[in-house]
Amino acid sequence: MQKARITLALSVLLLGLASSMAEIVAPGNRPVPPGHHALTHATVVTKPGVSVENATVVIHNGRIVSVSTEGKAPDTARIWDMSGMTIYAGFIDPYVTDAKPLSTTMTQSITGMEATAAGKPGFFGATGNERDPGQTGPGSGLSTMKPDFHVADDFSPKPDTYEAYRKQGFTAVALTPSSGIVRGQSALISLGQGSPNELIIKPNLFQHIAFDPQAAKRDEYPRSLMGVIAAIRQTLADAQHYKATWDYYTENAKTFKRPAYNQALAALQSAMQGRQATVMEPGSVLMIDKAVRLGAEFGIKPILVASGQEWRRPDLVKATGAQFIVPLILPKAPKMPSDSDWENVSLGQLRAWDWAPEIPAMLQK
């Protein structure tokens, strides 16, 4: 019996040593901080126009648990005194391409408002005879039609990739594909630091379509705005036919030949059936109506990306009733050596600079 008690005591001792050693960290290393925090004595803006004074914000494992007035911090929370500071909700940028805000990528097109990009014709034969390599693997025959592309597949940011966004108060962005006509699917990502697996909040966020005649290579179709719209319409019609064919095959597998697999057309099904929102870039105010009517033809109600030209035809904007993603574009006036040089600036450019700050308010109205 005494031997048994000694053995038991030794086992308890070894277990105690093992548990205490598990808490020991190497010299110079900080212990892992607890995930429980309380931000006290802050002014918290919970939504535009609504603020809470002397508030306590409790955060647990990265999630906001509560915002209360003069609330008591939990005993297990690490307390941070935020006296004299104001806490806002994080901003979300709904349209970021290649880690650049849309306002950066579109400024040139806004300042050069007079010239609408229509592309240069690169093919003059019958459709089907043009040289078009398309994409490798199963998919569309046109390289610009890639609805099966996912930005999440290539998402691997460096620690400082989104530092500028974080400093401006952004906590998440919709990372958007930037090339092609039917461009593929965006992803909602967190701007924190960590592995891509942890930072991707929602993959397959939106399907993106752009009226971009410059998307195709010089020897590819389409290279005109008319060709772009025709190619989009054909792709969406093919997606409808693809689903109908597979549905028929599923019900008649014994008598009907198995259809060919098309990864691009399969990827469009969520958008075509309303399970995934579609974002369209008309490129100009005159194409807004075309984008809405094109979407309606296939049961899609697109979210439109504003071009900055909406001040030209507010009647078209109002008639669509569409939702807009609005870039905050504030183009700078060019530096002119002398006052007389301003005579060479077109009226359209002057009006674009004058209207730019008012576009969001005009669309809201």
Image: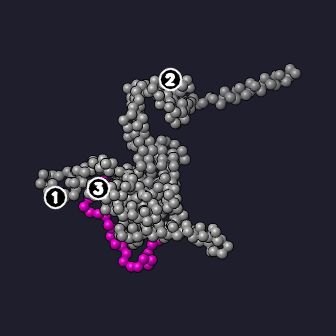
For residue 142, say whether it is visible: no
| Picture layout, residue 84 above or below residue 310 | above
Label placed on residue 72: 2
Specify whether 158 is left or right of 319: right
Would residue 278 be found to the left or right of residue 343 on screen? right
Q: Which portion, as a residue range, is magenta?
A: 106-134
Outermost residue toward the top? 2
Residue 213 lies, with reference to residue 302, above or below; the image says below
For marks 1 and 3, give the CA distance: 28 Å
Dot 1 lies on which element? Answer: helix
Task: Classify residue 118 by image quadrant.
Answer: bottom left
Residue kind at label 3, given as amino acid type: Pro
- From the viewer's side, name the closer residue of 92 and 332: 92
Which residue is found at the position 86% from the left and 20% from the top?
2
Q: Which mark is residue 314?
A: 3
* Mark sitting on residue 50: none
Q: Secondary structure at mark 2?
A: loop
Quarter of the image where one finds residue 162? top left
How far apart, in angstroms, are the residues tagged by discs 2 and 3?
A: 51 Å
* Nearer to the camera, 23 or 130: 130
Q: Residue at x 29, y 57 (%)?
A: 315
Q: Is residue 350 above or below residue 17?
A: below
Residues under labels 2 and 1: Cα distance? 65 Å
Q: Is residue 94 visible?
A: yes
User: Foreground: 350 or 154?
Assistant: 350
In the rendered image, residue 122 lying in the magenta stretch gets the answer: yes
Q: Which mark is residue 344?
A: 1
The crowding category of the residue bearing disc 1, from other C-alpha atoms within 10 Å (few below 14, some 14 to 19, many at least 20), is few
